[in-house]
Amino acid sequence: MALWLKKIQRKNPQNLAQSKWYLTQEKSGTVGIKAIAKEIEGRSALSLGDVQSVLSNLVEVLPVFLKLGQSVNLEGFGSFRVAVSSEGTATPEELNARHIKGAKLRFLPSAGLRRNLEGITFEVPAETTGTTKA
């Protein structure tokens, strides 16, 4: 199975008269917890309801540990952590919480998950059907 790509044109933010073409993934849909639970149910002795409950609880519990400043490692899948960005100051004494620009959730896939994606193939459309993005 191949990942479908599309061609899009993006303008240079510093010079809107310039643009280049890029390949980007053509999204083929979204998979939710129910579909994932159904797939896991078929591979295990657990019922669909049990799997859905575990996945739903994971979604609820994961932020609890992240808010405590912990990294969450799901062995074989990857790890999640919170990354904070802040403005710099001349001295450490000036630095405080007001300098925080924001926090983002970071995911680092496990080596096994990355290996499972190594054989991915791509299909590129012959014609230009993308749209212009700023």
Image (spheres, grey):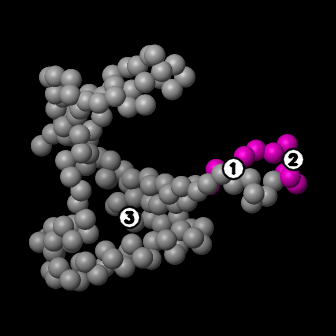
- What is the crowding at mark 3: few (fewer than 14 residues within 10 Å), some, or many (at least 20)? few
- What is the crowding at mark 2: few (fewer than 14 residues within 10 Å), some, or many (at least 20)? few
Residue 114 or residue 58, whichever sits in front: 58
Residue 47 versus residue 72 in the image, above or below = below
Sequence-wise, the earlier of marks 3 and 1 is: 3
Q: Assign a secondary structure to mark 2.
A: loop
Point out the frontmost of discs 3 and 1: 1
Residue 51 picture location, percent across and down: 24, 78
Region of the chain picked out in magenta, as a range = 84-94
Residue 70, picture quadrant: bottom right
Residue 50 picture location, percent across and down: 23, 83
Residue 123, picture quadrant: top left
- Label of residue 91 in the image: 2
Provide the residue designation for mark 3. 75
Residue at image coords 39%, 66%: 74
- Label of residue 86 in the image: 1
Identify residue type, mark 2: Thr
Residue 69 seen from this side: yes
Sequence-wise, the earlier of marks 2 and 3 is: 3
Residue at image coords 81%, 45%: 89
Q: Is 77 part of what is drawn in magenta?
A: no
Distance from label 3 to label 1 (Cα)?
30 Å
Are circles 3 and 1 on residues that touch, CB within 8 Å?
no
Residue 23 seen from this side: no
Q: Is 93 part of what is drawn in magenta?
A: yes
Sequence-wise, the earlier of marks 2 and 1 is: 1
Residue 99 or residue 9, whichever sits in front: 9
Q: Assign a secondary structure to mark 1.
A: strand
Residue 23 or residue 109, whichever sits in front: 23
Residue at image coords 16%, 22%: 127
